[in-house]
Amino acid sequence: MQLANSTILITGGSSGIGLEFLKQLSQHNVTKIIITGRDGSKLEQIKQQFPHIHTVKSDVSDSKEIGQLYNNITKEFPALNIIINNAGIMRNMDLQDTSMDLGNITEEIDTNLSGTIRMVHQFLPHLKKKSAAAIVNISSGLAFIPFPLSPVYSATKAGIHSYTQILRLQLKHTNVKIFEVAPPSTETPLLNAFSNVDMGSTVQNMKVDKMVRVAIQGILKDKAEILPGMAKVLKLMGRIAPRFFLNFMDGAVEKGKRKSK
């Protein structure tokens, strides 16, 4: 997939992986980069740092905002041909915590999974009109081996993995290429939710710049499924002995909780 002269929309572009995509894609002769995020002040700060990019305050968990985003973006940037569905949230969740209400417990589904599916459904007709287009869905290595502290997040990423596989099949006769990037544990603000658990050397976090560099190289080489760092190992473990490795992770989490007390 050629990135030069493309117009790219990145959801969740104000921090972490999305922000790093912005930084690195700026070095690939991309024509325009648009990022979205929920925090207007963060978007303003990034705009000051990268004046060549365009920012739009938008929440992918809100279907009406996605509709408005589509109307605005396709009018102002009709050449849009690549979407990176990166927006996501990750929480440390105890499923026995009865204080969580029914609306709050599905927040990760609304953003991570439903947000991605809605973005694709909304923008797909536009992308199909382009001579060369792509959708990049950010899943996770946790799609293959779930993380015991993040049950809903892990489920959403498994959902994105399955959805992306079928999306690729259904669009195989179109000009829209479908990529999945499944990062391993990566040094981003998402990990702040687990600062109270000492995982020691059990989890090796990948540098975000290295992870995104691998992802971009995979896109340039038309690699449909991109598994940076330990994500390859997680997928292999998920095939060979998923229960064993899930129990291993659970034991590491329990040990980490004790060390953190």
Image (cartoon, rainbow, N blue to C red):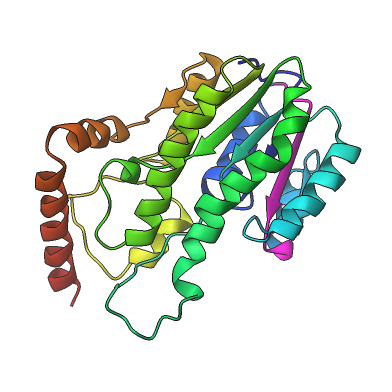
Q: Residue at x 73, y 48 (%)?
A: 49
Inspect the magenta stretch and tell me whether residue 35 lies in it: yes
Where is residue 189? Give x, y as percent.
47, 57
225 is higher (above) or lower (below) than 145: above
Please state which of residues 168 and 53 is positioned toward the viewer in this rendering: 168
Asked whether residue 20 appears in the rendered view, the answer is yes
Where is residue 254? Give x, y as percent.
14, 66
Where is residue 92? Give x, y as percent.
35, 67
Q: How many marks?
A: 0
Q: Residue at x 14, y 32 (%)?
A: 240
Q: Residue furthest bottom?
A: 99
Q: Residue at x 56, y 44 (%)?
A: 86
Please state which of residues 219 and 130 is positioned toward the viewer in this rendering: 130
Q: Is residue 258 left or right of residue 215?
A: left
13 is higher (above) or lower (below) than 153: above
Inspect the magenta stretch and tell me whether residue 191 lies in it: no
Q: Is residue 28 left or right of residue 107?
A: right
Q: Residue furthest front?
A: 170
Q: Is residue 11 left or right of residue 181?
A: right
Q: In which quadrant will I find the N terminus? A: top right
Where is residue 206? Give x, y as percent.
35, 41
User: In the image, which residues are magenta?
Assistant: 29-41
Please state which of residues 258 and 177 is positioned toward the viewer in this rendering: 177
Q: Residue furthest right?
A: 75
Q: In which quadrant will I find the C terminus? A: bottom left
206 is higher (above) or lower (below) than 199: above
Identify the image quadrant of residue 7: top right
Q: Residue at x 81, y 53 (%)?
A: 68
Asked whether residue 58 appears in the rendered view, the answer is no
